[in-house]
Image (cartoon, grey):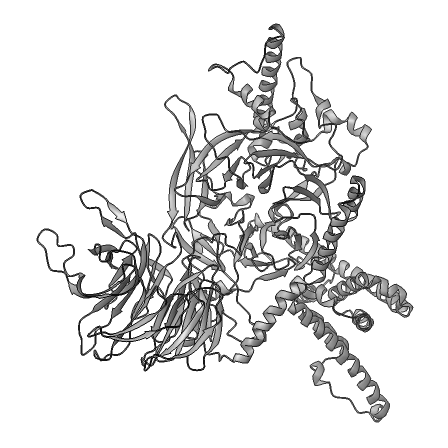
Amino acid sequence: RYECADAFGLTISSASSKAPQSNSILSFVGNNTSSTTNTNPILLTTAGSQCVGFNLRQCLPCIKLGHREHLSGGVGTGRALNSDEVVCLDTFTYTDNTARVATGWIDGAVRIFELNSNEASASGGNHGLVHSLLQRQNDDEHYGENNEDEFVMREPLVLNGHSQTPVRSIAFDRSGGGTRLASGGSDGSVVVWDIIAETGLFRLLGHRGAVTDITFLRLGGGSSRKKFDGLMTSSLDGLVKIWDLDGQCCTQTIANHRGEVWGAACMNIFSSKDQLQQQGGAEEDGSNERWRMITGSTDGQIRVWSVQQPKRTTTKSSTEATNDNSTQESDGDKIMTDTSNDNGKTDNDVTSPSSMHEDDVCQYMGSLLPPPNVATSTEKVSCIHFHPNGRYVGILHSNSKNVDIYQIRNLQESIKKKQRRLRRRREKKSSQGKTDPTHKKSGRKRGILDDPESSADEQEANKDIKDVQLDPELMKASDEFEYYGTVRASHKLKGFTFVPVKERGAGIRIACALSTNAIEIHSVVKKRSKNNGIIAVPEKVSGIDMYGHPTGIRSLTLSSDDVLACTVSKNITKVWNVANRSCIMSVAPAVPISGKRGTLTCYGLCAAFLPGNTHVILGTREGHLLILDIASGDIVYTEENAHDAAIWSIDVRRPTPEQEGIAIMTGSADKTVKFWDVEAQEEDEEDDDGAGHPMVVHTRTLEMSDDVVAVRYSHSTDPAKRMIFVSTLDCTIKVFFDDTLKFFLSLYGHKLPALALDASDDDTILASSGADKTIKIWGLDFGDTHRTLHGHEDSITDLRFVKNTHNFFTSSKDGTVRYWDGDRFHQILLLQGHCAEVNCLAVSRTGAFVVSGGMDRQVRVWERTKDIVFLEEERDRELEQMFDKVDSKGDEGGTANIMRKRTDDNDDDMDDDNDDDANNEQPQSEAAVKRSILSVSSGDRIMEGLEKADQELKDIASFRKTQGGQGKQRSPSIYLLGMEPAQYVLWLLRSIKSAELEQSLLVLPLSHVERLVYYLIILLKGGRGIEICARVAIFMIKTHQNQILSHRSMATPLRELRRLVRMRLAESRDTVGFNLAALRAIAKVAQDRKGAYFIPDEQTTNIWAGLGLGSDVAAALEKKGRKKD
């Protein structure tokens, strides 16, 4: 069995047909408020089936995060790299430098990884950069239990609540200590998770498009207001929703965007210490808040919203709040109100528009407009991020190379800016009143000396914002935000994030993810200009472009000793060390321009290692042959115009005892196959750089009737028996003898050209694969077709035999690699993991591993294990996967959505009032559960366990009647693992994952619910499993409430269950409270002793004195103290 051991060559993954574009593709480990002191944070990126962390100081990868792939039926090693694709990620760092990394995957799962302090720091070394199944099997002594390669395969916390749609956005609750998590899917659902309980709290319904951004809101907290626990979500349906998490409902829907909302961000910009000092050191009671939300949609406009606590959460009455408005109003509201005009009057009567609802949270403030001399993109806004310190915000437009940065003014500067704007507005009105009223304002042209700020206000006022009327007396976006600078990258950007480090000169750093599979770090520092002004100057600090190809991999080949691998893309050729997955050479192939200075970059199509593994020969689309020196990374020989068209295929004939020379065969679109001899270059007096390096000499040419697609040598060492195989564009394969180029066979059968072909080691069969999605196996004795194999869903791009066998691998544009048996003519394995088309593959000389590359720009390593493949099990697993896909589409939630859509279609013919009533009656939240094969099997296990426990009770009762009086004891049942029936039921409930427990209980019928309640009562009487028993009891009663009410026989057990649950939970609460009090006492004693002078001879005191005998440890310490006395 072959399994995926590792993947490399991918710095950051790109959006594909399966994985959508996400705004959360970059994140730093250590990005909370206290992480600004970290001088070298780790940058995590989404890279295919894993997350890769980069050390920005060394510009090298230092960590990998991934999970194992567990195949159904227990087959495989259980250590293979997963075949899924990560879409988004977010990180949260705790005070003890431990971190959690939450990732959203294409299969709808949320996986959370935990990193310790050593792994979360860049100075902790490299962790899990190489993961191999072969080394662990062959060298168990070298790879111990705590080896670093196991880190990449650490098992994460898996949360399943979304359907099969990808998770597009994910965010931690940073204000709540990182205990909650929110994820948004491509189907518009939002799930809030409890990480401590490892389960989903609820699912929010309301969006009809993919959720693009999520942010937790925690507003208020002062003496006059109650905290508002909210959530902001933006979606491609053009809506931005504010959710009340306490009520699990939507409190405000913003529908003022002209199209899809691709980016949104929300942050408290009044959190820095310098702003608090400017306000006189206000109390930290939650009143110093200035939340702002920025949204970007398809129209390219950047809208700013003020986020305030809704009026409904105010604890005081409206009259009392009005009387105390001038003295007890929060600083966040003062931004909108506390401005004094020239007459000395305070505008306290304009706190909010009269049309603002009491449940509304967001209020429109205007849009961000760059200066007139700065050109910005007008395409859709794809990404918006705040700096961790809340003083800067970055805006990225789609298909753009620039990131526009805006600086946020502090409170005093914003108020001054507003006062200047109002003063200019009054002066302008007064000057207009003195002029001729018949003067047409529209006909006046703007002069050079006109105020640019007044024109910007007019331009902003002319924006057509539906249902929004901006009051000029309120704070506007132009008062708080000012243009800071623009960071320009070398290529188009896919995303960016701010580096949480302090830059010299009060500057900032930005990490940009390029579309060329690279990362650039830019610094923006304030410098003094020639006019003694301060300007922001961006400059590139470093870049990470060595780790991967900028475009898809076209060709891949292995060296003869399986140590090196060469990959070829459009303009880059790289040589990798397969053992440590590192790139040792990266060359842009180019040829000199005749008669001019400079070089012309070539488009690489195929490559092969020359014997000795010191040079690589490369064929290009322009028809050139280039020889690269691996040691120096230079092009040592160029054969220009070797062919008149593109060179599609190249093969090398190894030296044999009969023929010591090295020959190369190339096939081109110019309808020729050319043969070359490899010779050593002679020393030249003028230029001795190429002395000793190989060169090619043209020897023979074979003319064909059509374009040549692929060429291949046979494996025979006898020159008289060696053959060459040529595939042409006319869908035929022609076989010639190598020594005389005499025609031997013509193989017909493919409906489209054969893109790849290869012969077995004994030269008895030839396998070819083409664009017609078929594989044909030919006999080389008579040229007959042995069998035609079907399986791939798209064109088959490459084919390679395993040495000394008739088994072979194929790669296809359907994104899969398949393993076939050439003797029995059937498929052995289906290997999935690539996110796009697979263009090439290479098999090692012993068949120990296979490497494949494709358009997703990554190289995956498939290694052979000791696990035996059973074809029947493989077919059963494929059927299970098909069942899982069909079952996920036809679950209860999907049926409810279909019925809801039908109701909406029927309501379209009704009046508007009826439509509003119908929409209000729709549920806005539901349980965050998802049915899968694991949950169904867990439910079956519970039912089977209850039946076993009931049977055991019957056997015990019958034993007591027959032999109980004789004093005999019945032996425990092996079916219950030697446990009592109630204890076995508790063990069964604990063996189910916490996230799947509720979904598993939904499978139980009412008869089994009655028996489960009986065992819960027995467990609670004995005080065993209090937490899980209470959770199961409450969930079952909520789920089967209607059936239980109609079933009167359960009234008595339910009363007893309620009494036991209340009693046991009260005892557990008292125990937890006592332990917390003891821990606080220990912490207090430790804090007091921290600054005290330590005297070794001083007699130690008992810290448990006066606390009572609350534990066995306290009793032992007290007993020990008495003995000393």
- The residue at 55%/49% (across/down) is 1093
Q: Is residue 54 left or right of residue 780?
A: right
Q: Is residue 976 left or right of residue 724?
A: right
Image: 729 above or below 455: below
**Quadrant (top left/top right/bottom left/bottom right) for the C terminus:** bottom right
Can the viewer see residue 130? no
Front residue of 439/959: it is 439
**x then y, percent, for residue 558:** 32, 67
Image: 563 above or below 957: above
Can the viewer see residue 351? yes
- How many tags in the picture? 0
Tell me where residue 280 sits by quadrant. top right
Front residue of 134/490: it is 490
**x then y, percent, for residue 729:** 34, 63
**x then y, percent, for residue 167:** 59, 54
- The residue at 31%/56% (across/down) is 604
